[in-house]
Image (spheres, coloured by chain):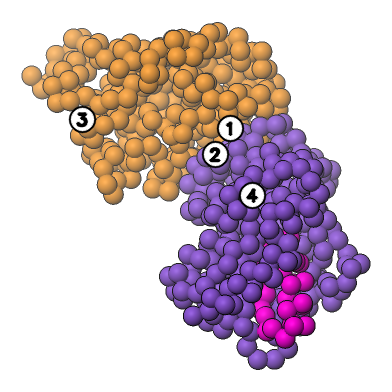
Chain colours: A purple, B orange
Amino acid sequence: MLNDKLKLNTKVFNSDVEQVPIRQGFGEGLLQAGVADERIVALCADLTESTKMNLFAEKFPNRFIQVGVAEQNLAAVASGMAAMGKVPFISSYAMFSPGRNWEQIRTTIAYNDRPVKIAGSHAGVSVGPDGGTHQAVEDIAITRVIPNIVVISPCDALEAKRATIACSKTKEPTYLRLAREKTPIITTNETPFEIGKAQIVFIPEKGLAEIGIIATGALVHRALMVARDLEKDGIKVKVMNLSTIKPLDGEAVVALAKETKCIVTVEEHQIAGGMGGAIAECLAEYYPTPIEFIGVKNKFGQSGTPEELIEHYGMGVESIKKAVEKVMKRKM
Amino acid sequence: MENLTDKKIEELEVTANNIRTSIIEMLLKAKSGHTAGPLGMTDIFTLLYFHALRHDKDRLDWKERDRLVLSNGHIAPVLYATMAHAGYMPIKELLTLRKFGSRLQGHPHREYMPWLETSSGPLGCGLSQAVGMALADRIDYGNNTDKTIYALLSDGEHDEGNTWEAVLLAGKEKLRNLIAIVDRNNIQIDGYTENIMPLGDMAAKYREFGWHAQEIDGHNFRDINDAIQKAKAVYDKPSVIIARTIPGRGVKEFERDYRWHGKAPNQEEADMALKELRTLGGKIKSEHE
């Protein structure tokens, strides 16, 4: 059952659940943050509407900088603005920022410890028809490895809005991972959000869980669908929405592993270096636990519908169920 | 910023010579680092920190200070030596360059030196940061700002696409509060710039991108100062000063030889260089002899 305490969307399992692109939440959050704090500025590399930065740009034209198709400049100019006391948000597709401009992010933003907020839209294979060149499935790995940076991957548009507003108030360089496609709304405006805090969104009706699923981003919805089916089959399951991947809420992860003794991680990203990798690093050190990883297995993406691609790369409901079955047999 | 008197120029010459001496001493001790670029840029750093730049070592958070971004961080020895001579840190600390635990990292890191505007070393992204500073300053003060954002670049880092992304943006935004000074010394690690990757007429390229461009002798204090004053008087464009410099300037044996780009002198070479510097190339009798 859904965890009541989090005041989640009760319609989440309905086929007519409201669906909104996660990037839309970013756009709305940035606008709201910009109204509240005039230090906030926005910079974009020729994808203003696509990344939903247009909401801010239209309201605050004097605080918006169009840098053209130049992601390296995007990151380094933002660093300079932050040096003067601004809180810059930069946006492009994740493949190009933090993809192409990784070194500028590392040196001018993270090494300098400047509060630049990097919004990478169109992350994951669910970008769809654009194909593999535009499907960032390496971005969590390349950002979480950089010191000083916070990495957040919201599960829906409302959480993206809350995450955007929350990170506008922090001093840390931050990567916000956003998806293009319409994504079911899981949370509500009453759902709490705190950077660095994992949330258990699905719990057994009573007793302890026997399997823990840790999911991030748009796939949290699929993890919930799996949990509901498992519940019907009499399997007690907990689902964690791990929206902050770094710093990792190690306490919550270890507590879940201690309870369930087995874990499945679910993310729309390469298995190597991703969120599952972060969980494995944590559990290997503090509470060794069998883990099965759902994610892209050392492949590039391709054209297709988001649904087709999620299934093809083994991240759909059936794949998650198989991983659950497998990992429960591996319990020590 | 007043005009330069003859007396002031004499003072600057002595200061520059002291800075060059420090550069040789610190590189000798460090046993690695870059020699040619720091010596070549010493006159420009001296003119900036001892005349043109609005700065105050006792007020690091002074909002109205000018900003200086060193993009080619590998010439850190001249930045450190100039700032030490300007009172930002003890001169004897210069001898810790590149050592474990030192604030004087091989390439500048602002976490260890809060008086730096940025960390640098990876080429091609310093001008972008200066552009960001100029944009932020314009948001706060409009075109009435009296602050200047200086970006110091190497010619070699114009091989980097990122540099030209910044050149384009500054031209588009007409950033009048931005002055870029390019160290046109014609060398980079692998050889002479025009052999490695021809840069051609840099001033013409900048002009084409919407900048005001000047070419000067980077060792003539009056030239440097006049160029900065002219740049500040340009109202509707960013300004670039292409400063022709001699790599290794001040030590005849090092001058114009690209092999001194990325290495430090040994004891014998340093002794020779220090002797030449302490006698101002034979103009004065060394007090050490």
The answer to whether tags 4 and 3 share a subunit is no
Q: Which badge, 2 or 4, is on the more N-terminal residue?
A: 2
Q: Secondary structure at mark 2?
A: helix
Q: Is residue A245 above or below residue B232?
A: below
Q: Say the numbered circle drawn on residue A104.
A: 2
Find disc 3 in the rendering and name its residue: B28
Q: Secondary structure at mark 1?
A: helix
Q: Amino acid at mark 4?
A: Val
Measure the alpha-carbon separation of dots 3 and 2.
32 Å
Q: Which of the two residues, A270 or A321, is positioned nearer the viewer here?
A: A321
On the image, the x and y values in percent for residue A124 come to: 69, 51
Side (left or right) of A68 relative to B230: right
Chain letter of the residue beneath label 4 in the structure image = A
Cα separation, mark 1 vs mark 3, equals 33 Å
Circle 3: residue type:
Leu
What residue sits right under mark 4 in the picture? A137
Mark 3 crowd level (few <14, some 14–19, many ≥20, 10 Å Cα): many
Which quarter of the figure has residue B246? Answer: top left
Look at the image and give the residue range highlighted in magenta.
A215-242
- Do tag 1 and tag 3 residues touch (Cβ < 8 Å)? no
What residue is pinned by disc 1?
A: B128
> How far apart are the alpha carbons under marks 1 and 2?
10 Å
Give x and y (percent) for residue B54: 49, 32
